[in-house]
Amino acid sequence: MSFWLVVSALLVMALSFVLYSFIPSVKRRRGNRAVIDSALTSAGDQQQELNVGLFREQQTSLEAQRDAGELSESEYVELLADAQRRLLEDVKLKDNNGVSSLQVAVDHSGNWLLIGAALVVLAFSILLYGQLGAATDMDIARLLQQSQSQQATGQDAKSAIAEKLHSALIKGTHKSPDNLYYWVLLARLEQERNNTEAAVTAYRGALAVAPDDANVHAELAQVLFSLAGNTPTEEMQAHARKALAADPGNASALGLLGISAFAQQDYRGASTYWQAALQNTAPMSSSAKALRSGISRAKALLGEAVSDWSISLRVSLPAPLVAPPDATVFVYLREWQGMPMPLVAQRVRVADLPLTIEFDDTMALSPERLPSGIRQIEVVARIAMSDQRQASSGDLEGRLGPLSAEQMEQSLNLEINSRLP
């Protein structure tokens, strides 16, 4: 809507030039120089306002996508920087060439050429709007939302809306090949459409824009793994390692490297990779269960005893205590009145509470200190109000302990019910 308001303003400006041409020549001559200067200044101001307005519109769109979880922080920063760069380049171009060129045209061609210049400004504004990507961004965002709504109702990835989104993304990647957002969205959509090879091509396009992006490397490694019939390949492992180089805690890359190690009968390496992946995986997700199963199998093949020890813990935040939904909750087990280092730990969010977590020996932070080998255990859940790993004043906390082996066989309830002084 704001775009069309700007267009309307430019049309009014152009119309004013036409009306001006019908003013009696005596009056025109008397104020000719002043009016032309005013018109030039107005044209420059209008163009500047349009550029800034378009940039703000794109910034608002990117912020909305980031807040909705459609863009990561790094993607948001990169896309915003790209929009800022384009805006600055356009402003510089206008300052150096725009006004001076228009001035020469007016001086040598008269009032009717001024009208033509106004129409050129209008056409250029529309072209600029498309080139900056705001129109494409808004179109893709709208189609993406509609496609997600359809998929939530059970429609497949090849519905009419999904096809339009697919076409828009292909157009977007050709029009703006340095737009990481377009490439990643296209790659994920190609996966949903079971176009694995096309997804690989799109991810490679994304890496051309952001060669050190951990998530892109990890996702490409996953697609290459699928393309090879769930068989580890050298290229898959190379991308997984690059993902870990940029983000050592990337659970997807760790899981894939664990699979590669297991396929090479490196069961110790597989267990190590999967243990690390487990620490960065939602505790009650299907991925976490698969990782625990893989760890147990690897240990069994190593001839190690596989423990069936586990503890089920329900964590909650009862009223009247409250905390921000995105605040981090650290839940961990440690030896009662022993070493302060946790035996096992998980990190969730306040928004996830209440939550039931199951801890077992496969989640141990150190293979030399298994929870099943500790006689008495203390359970701690702490909401880090300052987002720090170390406890600090104002944090919310709950504790249970000491817990005996018999008590840990039962389901336990842990309430976060106190504030640290």
Image (spheres, rainbow, N blue to C red):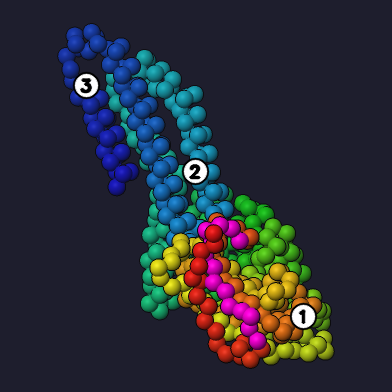
Whether residue 393 can be seen here: yes
* Numbered circle sitting on residue 83: 2
**If the image is split into quadrants, where does the C terminus sit?**
bottom right
Q: Quadrant of residue 38?
A: top left
Vertical relation: 265 (above or below) 136: below
Q: Which residue is label 1 attached to?
A: 262
Vertical relation: 85 (above or below) 302: above
**Location of residue 127 in the rendering, given as x and y in whole percent from the top left corner:** 41, 41
- The numbered mark, 3 or 2, whose residue comes first in the sequence reads 3
| Residue appearing at x 41%, y 36% in the figure | 51
Q: Amino acid at mark 1?
A: Phe
Q: Which residue is label 3 attached to?
A: 20
Q: The magenta stretch spans which residues? A: 391-404
State the residue in front, 64 or 322: 322
Q: Specify few, some or many for label 3: CA neighbours under 10 Å numbering under 14, 14-19, or 20 or more.
A: some
Q: Nearer the viewer, mark 2 or mark 1?
A: 1
* Numbered circle sitting on residue 248: none
Q: CA distance from mark 2 to mark 1?
A: 45 Å
- Reply yes or no: does residue 323 show up in magenta: no
